[in-house]
Amino acid sequence: KREYLMAKRLKCGNCGYTYQARTVIKKTQNSYYYCKGKAQRFLNLCDMPSFRVETIDVAIWEWIRELIEDPQSLEQGLLDVQEESRHANQAIYNRIDLIESQIQDTKSQLERLLELFLSGDFDKSLLIERKNRLDDNLDKLQKELAETQAHLDQNEISPDQIMQIEEFCSTIREGLDFADFEARRRIIELLDVNGTLAVENNRKVIYAKCLLTPQPVSLALTSHLLSIGAIATIRIACR
């Protein structure tokens, strides 16, 4: 019934719990994101304030619009994400190289074993036993390689994904001014936009991140009047 653009995509920078959305109906209807950890009052987990839904959603949408509407920044952002992803996953790449080397070595041993078997110079029962061990080891290595590669694919943006994102952004670029809530929410989901809410120097901030940015971006949201959530100018500063 309500439109919460960042529903289920915000977490608390204090306790780590997810922020949930709700609308307070008094004389006027005001919608807020509130910390689920703070709601667990009997646990006394958190003292974070609530955030106005409108303030958060507008800041996030304007940020996403700026990214999508600038093709050069979009392309560079995706390349930066890919480079940072490769750096973060270097240990996985190293493991894949090692597994592939072990697979090649095992195959070479199997080939030499076959030559010995055909020559008839060695006890065939011993050669068969050795072959079975190598086959088992090869199966384990190939299974580990497949699992490791699958894990890498889940944690890295591929060239195909970059092309798909660029094509998607190009398609929707001219229609951003007319995007309704459902369209904006779909864009948020496709770009995997997430945020961490915090209070710094008595100011509410959100650290936002999506597929287009390798590092979170800090969006200052409100003035010092935290109790009423007065809106100040929004600044964007790469962290």
Image (tube, rainbow, N blue to C red):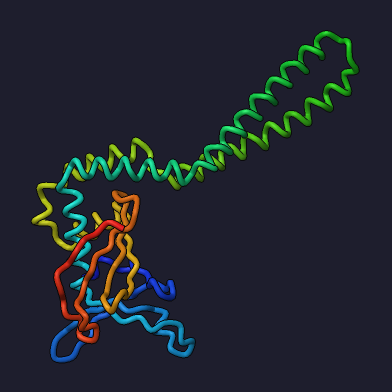
Q: In the picture provided, is 239 more to the left or to the right than 131?
A: left
Q: Given the current orientation, which residue lies at the most extreme top position?
A: 119
Residue appearing at x 23%, y 44% in the figure: 74
Residue appearing at x 20%, y 50% in the figure: 67
Quarter of the view holding residue 77: top left
Q: Looking at the picture, does residue 236 appear above or below residue 94?
A: below
Quarter of the view holding residue 24: bottom left
> Is residue 1 visible in this depiction of the protein?
no
Q: Given the current orientation, which residue lies at the most extreme front position?
A: 201
Say which quadrant the N terminus sits in: bottom left
Query: Residue 182's spot in the image, x, y percent?
Result: 20, 60
Q: Looking at the picture, does residue 92 appear above or below residue 50?
A: above
Q: Looking at the picture, does residue 135 appear above or below residue 11?
A: above
- The mark tally for this picture is 0
> Is residue 216 visible in this depiction of the protein?
yes
Query: Residue 66's spot in the image, x, y percent?
Result: 16, 53
Residue appearing at x 20%, y 81% in the figure: 229
Q: Judge by depth and name the residue closer to the eye, 91 or 31.
A: 91
Q: Looking at the picture, does residue 53 appear above or below residue 109?
A: below
Residue appearing at x 60%, y 30% in the figure: 100
Q: Judge by depth and name the residue closer to the eye, 48 or 31.
A: 48
Q: In the picture provided, is 221 more to the left or to the right than 125?
A: left
Say which quadrant the C terminus sits in: bottom left
Quarter of the view holding residue 117: top right
Query: Residue 237's spot in the image, x, y percent?
Result: 24, 59
Query: Residue 55's spot in the image, x, y percent?
Result: 19, 72
